[in-house]
Every structure is written in structure tokens, then in C-alpha cells.
Amino acid sequence: MIRNYFKIAWRNLVNNKVYSALNILGLAAGMAVALLIGLWVAYQYSYDRFLPNYEQAYQVRRNFNSNGDTLTFSSTSLKLADELRAKFPDIEYVAESDGNAAHSLMVGNTKLLLEGKQTGADFFKIFRFPFIEGNADGLKDPFSIILTESTAKALFGSKNALIKW
């Protein structure tokens, strides 16, 4: 019985080629769009879920008017962070940061030019990343730096990268 259904379907596909092609293309396009929408929804629901207390984390964006164009930045200036702390007592932590910028790092004869951010001491209270050595208290000093493991190995090799002043 199923064999007869496949025979009839095949005959209809062969006899009505244009109509069949339109139906198959429409079905493929519909399935592709549904898949993309499903992936987008899954991404939106998973965004920033790695954060502890992600329900309480918000991102502040600021608009900047530049010659009639409105530019939106997700970085927060120090002045804005201080104002947020002063005007909204419910805000527990503010992680001010600039946009990605190239920073030059040099140790001895080794010099690296890497993308990085400048941020405040509250950053690691919101984003809880594991530390191999040291802790988040290093950002209390404005001239301190926190390196990734790969950057520390590139700069210091096998030597200890943690320097306490």
C-alpha cells in the first residue's frame, strides 16, 4: 500500500514539474525560515545565562549625537557609573568599561599589541570568571591589570606573572 503512495507521488512530481518545483522550494524556504527563527529565539533565551543572578544584571547603553546621527554605545563612562550609584540606591554593582581598544603590553623584550577593555573594580563581582592565580581585588588599584592565561604565557613564559607591589 505504501509502495503505491510513493508511485503516485513520483508520477505527480514528474508530470507537474513546475508546480512540484514551486511546492518543494516553498517548503524548503519555509523550513529554513522556521529553523532560523527557532535558533534566534534559543539564542535570545540563552543570552547571559552564564551569569549568577542573571535576572538582576542589566546593560546600560548610551546614545551619542554625532552630526545628526545617533550612535549607541554599550560602554559606560566613569561619570555615568558614579551618577548611577548616586541616583539609584538599588544598584549594587556598576561595571564601567570602555569599548575594545588596542593596548600595548611589554615585559622585557616581549611586546604584544592586544585588544582589551578597561573596567572598574565591580566587574568581577558581576561577571564571575575563575582565576588561576590572584583574585578580583587587583582591580581596586587603577594601574593594575588582569591577564588571560594565554596572554600571561606569551608575556612571561613559564615565569610567575603575578607581581605584588
Image (spheres, grey):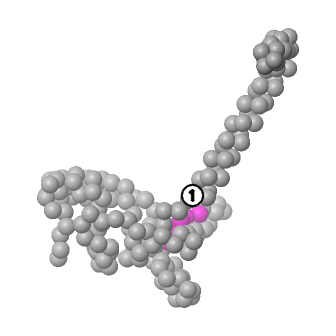
Q: Percent position (x, y) of residue 7?
A: 80, 13
For this view, does 97 lie left or right of residue 164? right
Element carrying mark 1: helix
- Residue, x 19% and y 63% (percent of image)? 161
Please give the residue where the numbered disc 1 appears in the rendered image. Answer: 46
Screen quadrant of the N terminus: top right
Along the viewing direction, whichever of 59 and 117 lies nearer the viewer: 59
- 34 left or right of 79 in image: right
Residue 89 image position (x, y, % from top left): 54, 88
- Of residues 13 and 125, which is closer to you in this image? 13
Which secondary structure class fits the magenta region best?
A: loop
Q: Is residue 65 left or right of residue 153?
A: right
Q: Quadrant of residue 133?
A: bottom left
Whether residue 73 is in magenta: the answer is yes
At x 53% / y 62%, what residue is drawn? Answer: 48
Above or below, comparing residue 62 to residue 148 in the picture: below
Q: Is residue 96 magenta?
A: no
Magenta part of the protein: which range? Answer: 72-76
Q: Amino acid at mark 1?
A: Ser
Above or below — where is 21 with respect to 96?
Answer: above
Quadrant location of the C terminus in the rendered image: bottom left
Q: Residue at x 61, y 58 (%)?
A: 45
